[in-house]
Image (cartoon, grey):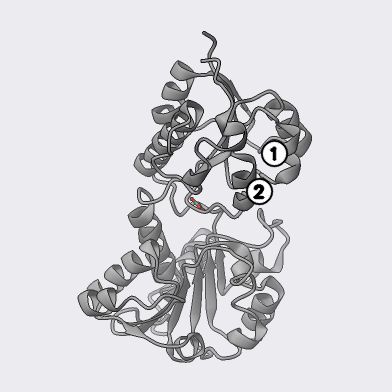
Amino acid sequence: MGKPRVFVARVIPDAGLDRIRDFCDATIWQDELPPPREVLLRETRDADGLVSLLTDRIDPELMDACPRLRVVSNMAVGFDNIDIPAATARGILAGNTPGVLTETTSDFAFALLMAAARRIVEGVDYVRAGRWQTWGPMLLMGADVHHATLGLVGLGRIGAEMAKRAKGFDMRVLYYDVVRREDLEASLGLTYAPLNDVLRQADFVSVHTPLTPDTRHLINRERLGLMKPTTILINTSRGPVVETDALVEALRTGRIAGAALDVTDPEPLPADHPLVSLPNCIVVPHIASASAATRGKMAEIAANNLIAGLKGEPLPAGLNNDAVGNGRNALPREW
Ligand code: GLV
């Protein structure tokens, strides 16, 4: 009996890769950059399974070009790069890596909030540039975090963890979500408000929504215009939830005080992009879940999802387990 053939679109931690190598005949893309589209199509053409990253677009073209493909295992919690209805229609199972990165990502979102509020990156730049001459009574004054108002846009797993961290700093926490969470309002002391009210009142706005057609450009020019001139925006969700040009304008004109971004649109952001050089904007390269332990756990879940899908079983973290036994997933297995 042969082993299933799989393509792994980047080197991922051994916690996942070792299992994948044991169970599968795996081709692993070694480059630091994602496989170019034509390489992804070529390498997946005869594959039974694919481990994808959020940089790989998994669309109907790819699914049809890869007729053996039964499972796509995304090593990320976000899955806006995968056309799930198209996968389900073909009987291709898809999975993501929720849960294990929740706290790590919210730790990082809070770190960005603190860094922007207290101007830590500007301070580091100042010292590195040899400009530190004395203790200055007016030097690099920032905004207090404690007792400020945090506005959460999206109260899923990561948003709720962000709220917990904020409570440790005695912050008042408002949130908006399409689903009202009265359980969390009670247990964490949160206040629900319509989106525009959250934006009007918050000293810090932190975005925690998935990217969907409804959330693309949710934070647009008009909504940035509702924020206070002292507000700082934090985005650790997906870049296109914030309208980039409108954000550049809001930061340049002082419409809002600052931004701290783990995700951008486009990604990567070119080094000469205005968001990179604006002193009131911090940009880091989409690393909110990047602790060694968490990336190991994500790789493990990605491997478990892949192998379950290859066996025709529901994925432990499945996005469309209703595809089990349907379409090409119902074809006989050779392993
Ligand atoms: C990272 O952005 C993820 O979705 O896991």
Q: Position of residue 78 (x, y in %)?
A: 52, 54
Residue at 59 percent across and 71 percent down: it is: 215
> What is the C-alpha distance between the residues marked 2 and 1?
8 Å
Mark identifier at residue 63: 1
User: Residue lying furthest top in this view?
Assistant: 1
Q: Quadrant of residue 259?
A: bottom right
Q: Secondary structure at mark 1?
A: helix
Q: Position of residue 135 (x, y in %)?
A: 38, 75
Of the pair 80 and 241, the residue shown nearer to us: 80
Residue at 56 percent across and 31 percent down: it is: 330
Is 23 situated above or below 112?
A: above
Q: Amino acid at mark 2?
A: Ala
Q: Amino acid at mark 1?
A: Met
Q: Is residue 230 left or right of residue 242?
A: left
Q: Quadrant of residue 156?
A: bottom left
Q: Quadrant of residue 27?
A: top right
Query: Do the residues under discs 2 and 1 have CB atoms within 8 angstroms?
Result: yes
Residue under numbered circle 2: 86
Q: Is residue 296 left or right of residue 40?
A: left
Q: Earlier in the sequence, mark 2 or mark 1?
A: 1
Q: Residues within 10 Å of mark 2 (few under 14, many from 20)?
A: some
Residue at 32 percent across and 64 percent down: it is: 161
Q: Is residue 28 left or right of residue 103?
A: right
Of the pair 306 and 174, the residue shown nearer to us: 306
Q: Position of residue 217 (x, y in %)?
A: 64, 73
Q: Secondary structure at mark 2?
A: helix
Evaluate whether residue 10 shows in this view. no
Of the pair 276 and 285, the residue shown nearer to us: 285
Evaluate whether residue 208 shows in this view. yes
Is 73 situated above or below 255?
A: above
Q: Is mark 2 within 8 Å of ligand 1?
A: no
Is 88 situated above or below 184?
A: above
